[in-house]
Amino acid sequence: MRAATRAPVRAGSFAVQLIAVSVLVLPLLVVTLQAVSRGWFYPDVLPRELTFDPAGEVLGRRRTLAALADGLAVGASVTVVAFIVGWPAARVLAGRSLRARGLVFGVLFLPSLLPAVGLAMGVNIVLLHTPLRSSMGGVVVAHLVPTLPYAVALLTAVFVRTDVDQERQAAVLGASPWQRFRMVTLPAAAGGLAVAAALVFLVSWSQYLLTLLAGGGQVVTITMLLFSALSGGNPTTIAVLALCAALPSVGALAVASVCLREGGGR
Amino acid sequence: MSSGVARSGHRGGLLGLAPVVLIVGGLSAAALLAGLLASVGIQAGRTGGPSLDAYRAVLGHPGFATSYGFSVLVASVGTAVAVSGALLIGFRWTRPSGRWRTAKLGLLQLNLSVPHLVWAVALLATFSASGWVARVVTGLGLIDRPAQFPALINDRWGIGIIAHVVSKEIPFIVMTLLPVSGRSTRAQLEQATVLGASAGDRFLHVYLPAVAPAVVPAGLAVFAFSLGAFEPAAVLGVENPRSLAVVALDRFRAPDLAARAEAFAISTVLLATCLVAGALVWSLTRRWLVRPAGPS
Amino acid sequence: MSLRVEGVRKRFSRQGDDVLDGVSFTVPSGSLTCLLGPSGVGKSTVLHIIAGLTAADAGTVHLAGRRLDGVAAHRRPLTMLLQRPHLFDHLDVADNVAFGLRVRGVRRTARRAAALEHLRMVGVHELASRYPRQLSGGEAQRVALARALAVQPSVLLADEPFAGVDGPVRRELQDLVIGLHRELGMTMVVVTHDMAEAFAMGDRLAVLDGGRICDEGTPEELYERPRSERTARLLGVSNRWSGTLHGGRLHVGERCLAVCPSNALGPLEGHRRSRWGIRPDRVRVGCGGANPITGTVTALRFVGAFAEATIGEGAGAVIAHLPADGRWRVGDPVTVDLPIEHLIELEDS
């Protein structure tokens, strides 16, 4: 009796999961397939021709390469700056009470609770009055607003996890402060630091509006090329650009999860 | 407290925090203030005192009410569905991990890492009237041409945008839920079970209060995002009604300063909406968020 | 090298009482001194202050006549085993043991060799290439011990080093430390709250309670003749009475007891308030002594080798260890004697 009523429930739950998984996976598969096809139109369920030629052609364009380079440069600079600025803050927060930490995080994440379009437009006119207008520096500074809170939160988590007693143990074994940092703290935190770096890069790379408006047209990233291709572009070109825009962040995520698995086992 | 090997001292504390708070808080406050000033006509290159012309123009526009209603509807429905879905997943995942948990988690993370514009493009390619699903349905002989396919994308009711918000934000909320769905919550749920609580009781009276401090801010972030998001609205939306975020950016990029003031007026309306929503949610969930201070 | 702690004070919170209120004691060169005390009296803090991990508010630490205050923790010629092994997860066992040599600039081959030698000393050289997460609690503790010994400290401090292990493994580790101490002749301070462990390991004990050292001496001395009330309580002198010394005899309530002058802290002549105690295992069954006491057994607790009996009620009750031969029942009348050589006067606290 019980089993009889359970079976449909289980089947229903399975169906829901199947739909959820296909909604998450299918779109990415379709775009990937589109990127390696030519002339794949309605009503063909599968492409008639699979080829890397259009992908190679798009990737070979100077504009594409420049956009990839711009995005990487911004992402890398944002990561470095966020680490330098976020490190001491995280160090301080790790030593404070949960309540104090929550308060500071609340302030830092507040801008994330505001509509992005207003923030981006506001940043644009603020930067207009500074030497950073329409420059990569301006984009990097603007990206700090969404990325720094993550950097501080992740670094704080790393420092909270690091065991002060390990540093003490190293001290009574004769390690100087610098040796303790280099031989104990850093190796213990390496996994967490890699995760933090990957996620900060990912958040920076994924910005569209903020990059567009802070860069004032001088910084062109792959998502911008993708956006302009959307109006009247070739589906294959669109798909290739979409993959270019997705791959670095997916890669960063892969790095993060590998590090998490290796460093998170304690 | 201790010499040399203790965590940073008390005095160095605020100094270390200052740059972070200054950059994040300062820049966003400056951006908000500049936007507010611009919306009342105070901008560089424009003379004259403050005026409410921009607000008059925006609110008086015949399409405004529709656009506003559309944006708020999409954001509310999207947030409600995303939060409920994420809560159900999170609650389910407090149970011992099944065989596919790691794979499912990886899938959510994968989705989380895909930029919004890319995800919108992918949804377009899959669910639009001439997209992959429509082709499969055609292949099965259920329809003959794209026009017969139900409008899931670029539709009047914003189903495409809502689908984007839901599919992209459920992973986000689930990720913020997971750390608070940990061991102590699991133990509380087990305790509730042996006290005779049904699954529904456990969800309502144990799980929800436990994850509220994480899910309420996450939900507000999702609402703000979907209200002010440009990419999904631009790719998956329609010309009429147009999402307010798209209208705002359109006005912002127009060459004349009056249009720019209107863009900021719209942004201020969106901001006010977020604040009202935040206040509403706060008053409804305060009893879960504010815990009496215990001995520290 | 002898270690001298003098007048150490440490207060943690502004409102809180002094945790350490003038702690002074000496660890003779080559001794294994156990710092004994109940939980939460600041034993760990004393070690942390000696090691330089915590700064004292007042007081000094001298090692072989050299003042250590102001010397950074990593420059002190001593080392410490913290409460848990705290092995470095990213280093294998041999590198963990070699850590202290690495920070002293010893070259890799030399320090690996020294590490192996010290691992052999503690009996786990076969674990050299394992990683900390692959070790059991006892193994990790041995590795931590080897790591501390490898730096050849002039003093080894150990903070409840066996708190994480139980049963036979704990016993093995105690024996290992005793053996190493005998072999190396190293000065050691071991913190513990376990009386049996302190008796088994230490050649000297210092009892910390109430913010001060309340007794110092060999285990035998302190067992037989604790001076302070706190030490007596900690070391199991469960019969403690307040009374009046008058005419050379102790009056506790109705009872009048003969005492021995050598067990008193002051003159027996005259009239004064005084506090005395006797271990329950020194209370003798039967009459024929100077202080016979008759009463009924009001409570009986079987402990194994003996039964712990409470004789009489209220403040005058006597606790005695009776033979566990099943002869005794609650309610039975019994006569015991308090031998005067074991009746001792205690400093009132």
Image (cartoon, grey):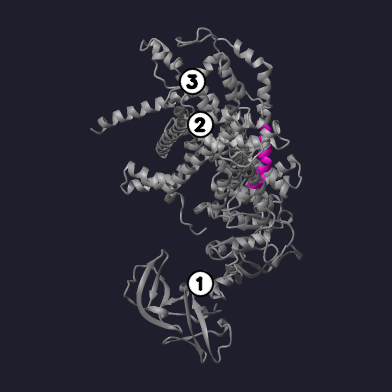
Disc 3 and disc 1: Cα gap in Å?
A: 80 Å
Label 1 chain ID: C
Of residues A104 and B90, which is closer to you in this image? A104
Which range is magenta?
A75-89
On residue C233, the disc is 1
The reply to whether residue B184 is visible in this rendering is: yes
Would you name the residue on which mark 3 appears?
B124
Q: Is residue C133 left or right of residue A180?
A: left
Measured as percent of width and height from the top left, residue B197 is found at 32, 46
Q: Residue furthest top?
A: A48
Of residues B237 and C79, which is closer to you in this image? B237
User: Could you tell me which secondary element the residue under label 1 belongs to?
Assistant: helix
Of residues A250 and C173, which is closer to you in this image? A250
Q: Is residue A168 left or right of residue B100?
A: right
Residue type highlighted by circle 2: Leu
The reply to whether residue C92 is visible in this rendering is: no
Residue type highlighted by circle 3: Leu
Q: Crowdedness of circle 3 by 10 Å Cα count: few (<14), some, many (20+)?
A: many
Q: Is residue A82 magenta?
A: yes
| Comparing labels 2 and 3, the label whose residue is closer to the camera | 2
In the rendered image of this protein, does residue C7 appear above or below residue A3? below
Q: Circles 1 and 2: CB distance less than 8 Å?
A: no
Measured as percent of width and height from the top left, residue C142 is found at 60, 49
Q: Is residue B4 magenta?
A: no
In the rendered image of this protein, does residue A26 appear above or below residue B19? above
Residue type highlighted by circle 1: Arg
Label 2 chain ID: B
Q: Is residue C241 left or right of residue B19?
A: left
Mark 2 or 3, nearer chain start: 3
Residue C221: image quadrant is bottom right
